[in-house]
Amino acid sequence: MYIVPTPIGNLLDITYRSINILKKVDYIITENIKHTSVLLKKFSIINILLSLNACNEHKKTKKYISMLKSGNNIALVSKAGTPVINDPGYFLIKESYHQKIRVVPLPGACAAITALSASGFKTHQFCYEGFLPKTKTACEKKLSSLCHEKRTIILYESPKRLVKTMKLIKKIMGKRRKITIAKEITKKWENIQRGTIKKLLSKIKKEINWKKGEITIIINGSNPIISNVISKKVFKIFYILEKIMQKSTAIKITAKICGFNKNILYNTIIKKKLHEVD
Ligand code: SAM
């Protein structure tokens, strides 16, 4: 079974090997028949398309495994990019290994890696988080767990949720955190912006063209040196305010001045105080 990446916008990004495999296999399994038909037409590939999507993945895996076991060669493609990366195919691949079917991955387009390469952040270590959870609470929890992540963070996001997500990143990771937003990579309206979350948020709120298109967000990893420098200043502000007002109000104001989430600041201050007592 071949895992064949397809372009994420510009059809010329397909590889010669991918075209060859798509021509030679007995069947092509795709997440989106309509989308893949356009690709096949462009490269004069004539082949049989079968579907595999989030709704039928469990049911169809059994059928495709038996086709593979009867000696058919199959190529797995997604709507765009590398199959299985936030796309269907996991069960099929796992079951292929179970059934001792050879799995052959081809290299090719992937939005996450393409955006990362242009992020301008460290790329020797990174973590891929896909889409953030949909509800605000779960999203906040996830971002809080990533707040001190030192590696560069890759996220997929829909344009409809972009502003909301950026506001949460600002609230939880602070307004100075650097991010890169890559929109419509490889397409005509490709737009890559890099800067602090505060700067990019105000830009995106003003410009209407950010409401559409495919978006990948890259967040610079947490820099412990900068965090410590900020912490010292933040604590100083907090201690001054704490002398003249209630602790909870002092935390609220400090968080507002420094662009931090008040709960995270509260926890950090409590931890620091406990540490000082120790
Ligand atoms: N398997 C795909 C891959 O390898 O890139 C990703 C599939 S995921 C369902 C689709 C998401 O990838 C989009 O919502 C967007 O966040 C990101 N994406 C896809 N194409 C993109 C592009 N041309 N520019 C920026 N982000 C893109």
Image (tube, helix red, strand yellow):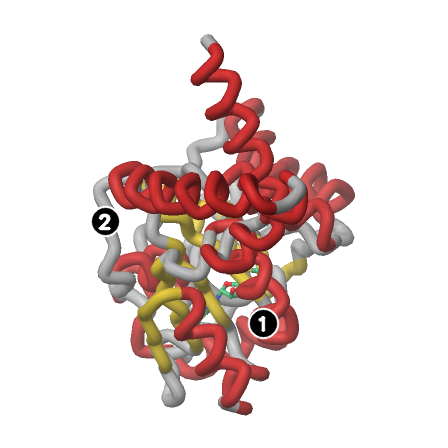
Depth check, front residue: 175 or 146: 175
| Residue at figure coordinates x 55%, y 58% from the top left | 256
Q: Which residue is mark 1?
A: 163
Q: Are marks 1 and 2 in contact (CB under 8 Å)?
A: no
Three-letter residue code for mark 2: Lys
Q: From the viewer's perspective, is 160 left or right of 277?
A: right
Residue 133: where, in percent of width, then height?
Answer: 67, 50
| Residue at figure coordinates x 28%, y 45% from the top left | 226
Say what secondary structure mark 2 lies in: loop
Image quadrant assignment for residue 58: top right
> From where the camera sits, is residue 18 visible?
no
- Neighbourhood count class around disc 2 (C-alpha, 10 Å): few under 14, some 14–19, many 20 upward: some
Q: Which residue is mark 2?
A: 122
For residue 167, above or below residue 234: below
Q: From the viewer's perspective, is 86 left or right of 150?
A: right
| Residue at figure coordinates x 49%, y 59% from the top left | 257
For residue 196, above or below residue 255: below
Residue 250: where, in percent of width, then height?
Answer: 59, 46
Three-letter residue code for mark 1: Val
The nearer-to-camera label among 1 and 2 is 1
Mark 1, ligand 1, within 8 Å: the answer is: no
